[in-house]
Image (cartoon, rainbow, N blue to C red):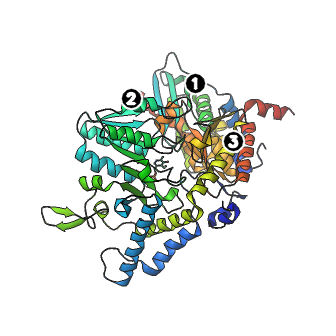
Amino acid sequence: MQFAEPELDELYRELILDHYRHPRNKGTLDNATSKAEGFNPLCGDEINVEVELEGDIIKDVAFSGRGCSISQASGSMMTAAIKGRKVADAIALLGDFKRMMTDPEVEPGEDLGDLEAFQGVAKFPVRVKCATLAWHVLEDGLESKS
Amino acid sequence: MFDVDTLRKDFPILSRQVHGQPLVYLDNAATTQKPRQVIDSLVHYYENYNANIHRGLHKLAEEATEAYEGSRAKVARFIKSPEGARSVIFTRNCTESLNLVANAWGRKFLNAGDEIVLSVLEHHSNLVPWQLIAKEKGAVLKFVDIDGEGRLRVDQLEQLIGPRTKIVSLVHASNVLGINPVRYAAELAHRQGAIMVVDGAQSVPNMPVDVGDLGCDFLAFSGHKMAGPTGIGVLWGKPDILEAMDPFLGGGEMISRVLLEESTWNELPWKYEAGTPNIADGIALGAAVDYLEGIGMENVRAHEKSLAAYAIDRMSALPEVTIYGPKDPEERVGVVAFNYGDIHPHDLSQVLDQRGIAIRAGHHCAQPLMRRLDCVATARASFYVYNTFAEIDKLVEALEGAGRFFDPDAAAAARMS
Ligand SMILES: Cc1ncc(COP(=O)(O)O)c(C=O)c1O
């Protein structure tokens, strides 16, 4: 435990903090096939997501932007989770992730793996938007492509 | 001076706990807490003399009208309105007051090519209404910049206010940075025949404001930031200008004689108060004014200044902290906007909340200013009469804790040991 307050430990799981401090896939792509950006007017968080598709495979993905630890860690963990996977799988994961964030009672349909670290965020309603921002941007990017 | 510990007992909410900790409320620039006297005034109205005003010829209507108009007179006295209560229009909030001026004055007197001078540090409520009317009229917006310390650039103010300027509208005390030279701006505006509008949302609650001395034509502020209830705000205006403009909203109360095709307007200030007003909150605003006058606005100002000085002093001692705006507490109200290293203000505020400390994190409804300061957002601690030095100590302690937690090197070091 890092905090005297257990609620904070639940929100800021070690895995989330690790991705916040050492973000994966942060930056831009040379051969992006789609780009999208999103903005959270409440806090000014910005996230850009770039995807390089090869057929229906997400060959590469990167994110950039500025924001709180939850939004940045979410961008990092999202890119790590979908890189190399089929677009359809990424979209299914997106649905499961959003469901986990908005309805914590529902058991995720698929094993969300590391992404389950965000389960604690669902208990902090104002932070849910921070966690889902990167996913919404990904959705926009993939939609504009298809 | 006054005794803060005694005064705190007037505010029921200050004895509550948040996440098991005593509440430390440092988000007063967003809205202040309300003393028992204000809460009682609301309850007393609803329990004893709730009635519509200005219309009924019965006892309750008479009492309600007297209390509502009495409150207007208190507000007029509070800001030393040279022509009394005629100048005091009740609105919903500061935002509505500014929209009233932009619409009523702008619609009647603005023409294509006219210039409206604002600044980069305005709250959205003193920016967006002007954008709307400027677009409608083909008027041009001009923006005064800030200097490296976050002060309004007076040289630019002098430069930008010119013969085409019709309106100058500036925030008196910023909700992020410091106090602006609005009296001088009013002089400059009047020299060019322009009107001067002042956003007093953060000044009227926190320091003595003498509207005649400020020399502006309009002053807008909100009741909820000065110990009063939400839902009631004020637009003070010079009577000759209020007479010259057409009404903002039409309906009952604001008319004199209504025919099918046209109408004539009620006298000031009712010309600008269409429909049944917010009677209860209007009356309670009077109770808030009584409360603040009981303390004395010089004392409110002095207390907040010493809190701000202490907060700036203690926070500046933390190397990671960046404080925005002029460092001299003389130049600001009890507002301290800051950042802590690279930690996002949301994360800071989350950690502080868990310790019962309420601060604001975000863009403070000043997105252009955030871009100008080159940050996404800031944290902000803002003080009111009931805050204490011990609360600032708690804030600083919690900030240090958050810093240790989010700083990767410190966290790694802690794991090693
Ligand atoms: C400087 C300033 N102007 C205007 C406003 C708007 O006040 P309200 O939201 O009560 O209309 C605020 C409050 O946030 C403010 O701080």
The amino acid beneath tag 1 is Gly
Q: Residues within 10 Å of mark 2 (few under 14, many from 20)?
A: few
A115 left or right of B362 in image? right
Answer yes or no: are tags 2 and 3 on the same subunit: no
Closer to viewer: mark 1 or mark 3: 3
Q: Depth-wise, is mark 2 or mark 3 nearer the camera?
A: 2
Q: Are marks 1 and 3 in contact (CB under 8 Å)?
A: no
Q: Which mark is residue A84?
A: 1
SS at mark 2? helix
Q: Which residue is mark 3?
A: A12
Res. A138 visible in picture = no
Q: Amino acid at mark 3?
A: Tyr
Residue at the left extreme, as displayed: B261
Numbered mark located on residue B159 in the image: 2
Q: Is mark 1 within 8 Å of ligand 1?
A: no
Q: Residue at x 51, y 68 (%)?
A: B287
Q: Check whether the beta carbons of the residues at disc 2 and disc 1 lie within 8 A of each other.
A: no
Res B38 visible: yes
Which label lies toward us, 2 or 1? Answer: 2
Identity of the amino acid at label 2? Answer: Gln
Residue B272's place in the image compared with A98, above or below, is: below
Left-right relation of B32 to B118: right
Q: Position of residue B239 (x, y in %)?
A: 31, 56
Say which residue appears at 70% left-offset and 50% top-offset. Answer: A7
- Vertical position of residue A101 compared to residue B161: above or below: below
Chain to which mark 1 belongs:
A
Label 2 CB, ligand 1: below 8 Å? no
Residue closer to the observer: B1 or B61: B1
